[in-house]
Image (cartoon, grey):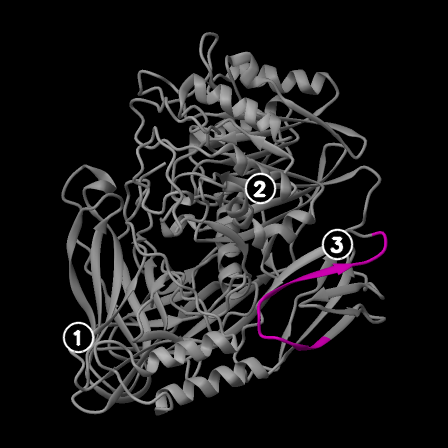
Amino acid sequence: MSGPAMNLPRPFARSFSSATSAALLAALAGCGGGGGGAATDPISQREQEAIARFNSTPIALRGQVVSAMGAPLENALVRIGGRTVRSGAEGQFLIEGLSRRNALLTASADAHRDEQAAVFLQHPASDAEVILQPLVLSPTGAQGVRFLFAGDTSFGRRFLDPDADTPPDQVPPSDPQALIQSADPVPGSRKVLSFIQPVLDAADFRAVNLETPVTSQPATPHPTKDFVFFTLPASLSALRNAGVDYAGLGNNHVYDYLEAGIADTLRHVAAAGLAHSGAGRQAAEAFAPSRVSLGGSRYSLLSMSSISGADHPITYVATETKGGSADLRDTVRVRSAIAAEVAAGAYPIAILHTGQEYTESPSDFALDRMRTAAEAGASLVVAHHPHVAQGFSRHQGVLMAHSLGNFAFDQDRLETMLGLLARVDMQAGEVRRAQAIPVYLEDYRPRPIAGALADRFIRRIGQDSQAHGTTVMPVNGRGRVLGAAETARVFDRELTVTVSVGPQGFGVLDLRGLLQSGESLYMATTLSPGVRLVAGRDRLEHGEFEDYDLDDQVGETTRWDTSGTSSFACLMAPRSGAMALCSRRQAGDSQDSVVALRNRVRVLGDPENEPNKRLTLYGWARGESAGAVRVVARYYASEGEASFGEETAVSLDAGSFGWRPFTADLSMPADTTTGGGAENARAVRLFIRHSPPLAGQALASLDDLAIINWQSGATASAVTLPVPNANEFLRAEGAPGDLQLRVVLRRLE
């Protein structure tokens, strides 16, 4: 695990409740450093009207409930936002009068498993309804078991101490700014999982990677390890209260407090009523499985880690004479442990901690370890450690989840904030169905996500899976993992679009507004001579200023620092969707308004030390008597505090203008040392500056920002991509002027 990107103030979320809106508008009327004026000034009045319109305009939801065979399910029960309806003869339903708050839908029918979908309802007030893809309910089986696997989980470090500066051999004092209070950890620990609780409730058996020692006496931190942390014993009640049944302990942090920490962890986990495996006071105990009978079958969960700490005098893995995690590098013992469970008539599930941190695809070594477990007889393989979610594959018919990423973990790296839950339906050891459920870790706490963010994330997971011969396709914001014998149907949609190539010799086509749910860019061609195309992917992920998660706040912009009074997520005039970023200034203000991106955006290839620094900043801006607007790009190392200067990427003159796009290639400094991401520029943060106007009040709005990482390699006259994929941009290079592209968008079903 790497160190923090940077300590930044925790954001204050904004909700569009009437009380919060009134307080916000009062603050806007007197935005500090100037910005005074009556509470009914035109800008505040318009935003107040937009909020009232958003809150008072209901939205409808339309969909269909079908069986796994595609047959309509009549009289299915559909619940969302406190409303309940029954499906009609064709399985169709319509729910009217819903609030524009994202919500979790549940569909139920006799002799079928419930199905859930996180529904994005925060559409602009002008949108009358949302239409879902068909909700597919699978049949219940006499021996069916629904497993839910979650990734890296801890309740320590920044959960207890937001600044993470307490010495590792001490328990932090209670801090009112902390999520968990050390004097009474239970309430805060339970809040960590509160938003994801309905998803946990829908499973029969729930497992997490408990990547932490559990102790109240942290007196023995590992003497040479860079990052050590612990969870207080009382926090484990949050896992049991949430229904978690099993904690995998085979990871590279369980031995952070050496033998005393292992002994405490084993004692406290058992006392909390959590089944567990993967760690012990010697190797035999660490390799011992956790056995459970479910659905008339016996399952054995074996947890192991390949991150051994071999470069330290004291390793992290158990041997015959010391404690630690089960050693996944020990091929003989791995095969023996799994084979013994098969011989005993159980179905082994291998839970592996392996891979390279922060990568989006599994390393060759990690794949080898997963395949070794499958060959030894594992019925299912679930992996983690990279802190970034990866795709799925199969080996000898065995489903393997490459990395679930984080579940409840205190990392500030942007790429670690999207994780997966793997929902796997098994019957007598056979995987019948599998689903990838996306979660977003805001303030380190998981919550479901919906809309474009969920769809884009699942398409990225599908891209990695497709590279390993497995199809994962987005359906209603979740990833459906096709079975080995299943074949997806293909639906293509062809468009002809115009791209304007500017004097700088390139133009950018933004496909985000053209892609429908589940669609990916499949092909792009041009008939214009001398034009070269390349596809790209947004690394920013949070430049649309929409609120895609399901929690108790509406209208959050938590990845942007809008904690002052001069900038806010505004509803009054977005370029697309429901919200944009607004900044107001007025004559006489002494300073620019500054909105900072809280997190670093790292380039593709950074973890592998093969950085792709081909970046373009893209977005839209609008001004109402606006002061000058600048977007500054500041460059950082991937980790640590090293910085490498900044550039003004975009500069917009003061004045009034409608929504207009801007593009600018970013000039991230080239690597100058062999020291990797810690010593070279590999990341960028954005700072949006809005200067005071010469007279009157000024409003500047930005929307649909992206930091596009273009594919490496040469450009060509045509682009063809595997589907699904997360590429939502095309770059056309050639002579200035308008040109037409033929674009094919593909959806799998």
Q: Amino acid at mark 1?
A: Gln
Identify the image quadrant of the C terminus.
Answer: bottom right
Q: Position of residue 144 (x, y in %)?
A: 78, 40
The residue shown at (65%, 53%) is 198
**Label 2, on which residue?**
238
Q: Mark 3, residues whose alpha carbon is within 10 Å: few (<14), some, or many (≥20)?
A: many
Asked if residue 162 lies left or right of residue 277, the reply is left
Tell me, yes or no, if residue 327 can be seen here.
no
Q: Kindly identify which numbered label has been placed on residue 28.
A: none
Q: Residue 67: name its quadrant.
A: bottom right
- First reached walking from the N terminus: tag 3 or tag 2: 3
**Label 1, on which residue?**
591
Q: Position of residue 686 (x, y in %)?
A: 26, 63
Looking at the rendered structure, the secondary structure element under dot 2 is helix
Residue at mark 1 to residue at mark 2: CA–CA distance:
46 Å
Magenta-span inclusion, residue 167: no
Is residue 588 depicted above or below 636 in this figure?
A: below
Q: Looking at the image, is mark 3 or mark 1 nearer the viewer? A: 1
What span is colored magenta in the figure? Answer: 95-111
Label 2 near label 3: C-beta < 8 Å?
no
Is residue 425 depicted above or below 331 in this figure?
A: below
The residue shown at (16%, 64%) is 647
